[in-house]
Image: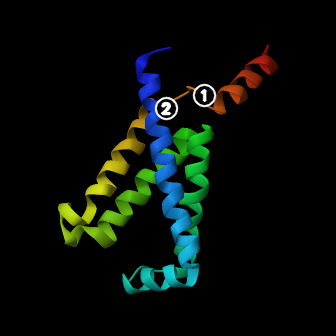
Amino acid sequence: MRQSEIGGFILRLVLGATFIMHGLAKWQEGIPTVAERFANYNLPYAELLAYGVTGLETIGGIFLIIGFSIRFFAFLFVLLMAGAIATVKYDAGFLHGYELDVALMAMAAYLLFASNRFLALDNFIVEEKKKKNK
């Protein structure tokens, strides 16, 4: 096992936990309130987007932690952060605006390109496929 695997695992846990916390905060706030906030940002389909973002943050965060479809969810998180920066936070500037989004996007991009198989559920799925192909 390489040291980068442990580093990627730590990134995966932190990124997953961060998105879970953001998703749970949106669930507690209430989807109608989140949708109203999204509508105030002039985002189209605010209610559908509120459900989608909240669900992605919660489910995607859990999947990152357990190591299931890491690259897929990392890709979705890169898109989510790029969208948040472009549509909502860019005008606020880097500091007190989109600095956290850039950091989360960079973490997700690392997982997208390097992935991480250390203690990942994906390992068991790959092993089962290899056994079936033999």
**Is any atom of residue 50 visible in this view?**
yes
Q: Amino acid at mark 1?
A: Leu
Q: Which residue is mark 1?
A: 119
| Above/below status of 61 relative to 93 | above
Q: Earlier in the sequence, mark 1 or mark 2?
A: 2
Residue at (49%, 39%) from the top-left corner?
A: 12
State the SS at label 1: loop
Residue 128: mark in rendering:
none
Residue at (42%, 44%) from the top-left corner?
A: 108
| Above/below status of 26 relative to 58 | below
Residue at (25%, 57%) from the top-left corner?
A: 99
The answer to which of 44 and 41 lies nearer the viewer is 41
| Above/below status of 62 relative to 52 | above
Q: Are marks 1 and 2 in contact (CB under 8 Å)?
A: yes
Label 1: few (<14), some (14–19) or many (≥20) C-alpha neighbours in 10 Å: some
Residue at (48%, 62%) from the top-left corner?
A: 22
Q: How is the image coloured?
A: rainbow
* Horizontal side, residue 81 vs residue 46: left or right: left
Q: Which residue is mark 2?
A: 9
Q: Position of residue 55 (x, y in %)?
A: 60, 63
Label 2: few (<14), some (14–19) or many (≥20) C-alpha neighbours in 10 Å: many
Question: How far is the residue under mark 1 from the one under mark 2?
Answer: 8 Å
Q: Position of residue 93 (x, y in %)?
A: 18, 66
* Horizontal side, residue 69 vs residue 109: left or right: right
The answer to which of 62 and 126 lies nearer the viewer is 62
